[in-house]
Amino acid sequence: MENPQPDTTHNLDQLREDIERMHDQICYALRGPVRILMLFVIGAEGRYVNEISELLDIPQSTASRHLAILRERGLVETERQGTSIKYRLTNVHILSILDDMRRMVTQEKS
């Protein structure tokens, strides 16, 4: 199966603009492994901040700070349930993208 190649010859300016936007929004948000782990932990069902901090063994304040960045960058959204706030992925497709990247790196080690 062939790998699809982006057509960079016709609209390089648009590609450049899209990549700059992607870098500003997504790459910054994914700086550091904790935020990437958070996205996997949140998963398709979503999680509360206390669950996330417990699973990742980090203080709740640290989890909240990272979640705020993920939210500012549009990768997670919140849903208030009573006095608690549940974090959900804005697009679950990010999980398959991150998993593909993880597999690519782990295959290189083999």
Image (cartoon, helix red, strand yellow):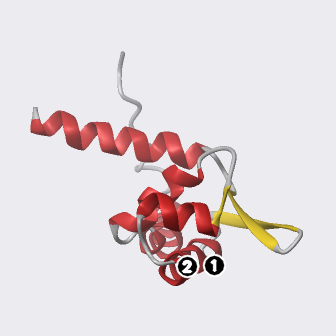
Q: Quadrant of residue 64?
A: bottom right
Residue 49 position in % (x across, y down): 62, 68
**Which quadrant: the N terminus?**
top left
Q: Is residue 51 left or right of residue 12?
A: right
* x then y, percent, for residue 32: 34, 70
Real-space Cα distance between discs 1 and 2? 5 Å
106 in relation to 34, above or below = above
Look at the picture and state if 29 lies above or below 48.
below
Residue 7 position in % (x across, y down) = 44, 43
Q: Within 10 Å of the Cα at label 2, are there few (<14), some (14-19), or many (20+) other Cα atoms?
A: some
Quadrant into which the C terminus falls: top left
Work out whether residue 2 or residue 79 is closer to the camera in this orientation and state it: 79
Across the whole image, how many numbered discs are drawn on residues? Answer: 2
Give, as a three-letter code, the residue at label 1.
Answer: Glu
Res 81 seen here? yes
Q: Nearer the viewer, residue 57 or 2?
A: 57
Residue 19, position in %: x, y? 46, 64
Asked if marks 1 and 2 touch (Cβ < 8 Å), the reply is yes
Element carrying mark 1? helix
Residue 16 falls in image quadrant: bottom left
Which amino acid is tagged 2? Ile
Residue at (38% x, 38% y) in the render = 100
Residue 58 marker: none
Reading the image, the residue beneath label 2 is: 69
User: In percent of the image, x 45 and y 66: which residue is there?
Assistant: 35
In this view, 90 is above or below 58 = above
Label ID, residue 72? 1
Give whichever of 57, 99 is nearer the camera.
57
Q: Residue at x 59, y 43 (%)?
A: 93
Residue furthest to the left in view is 110
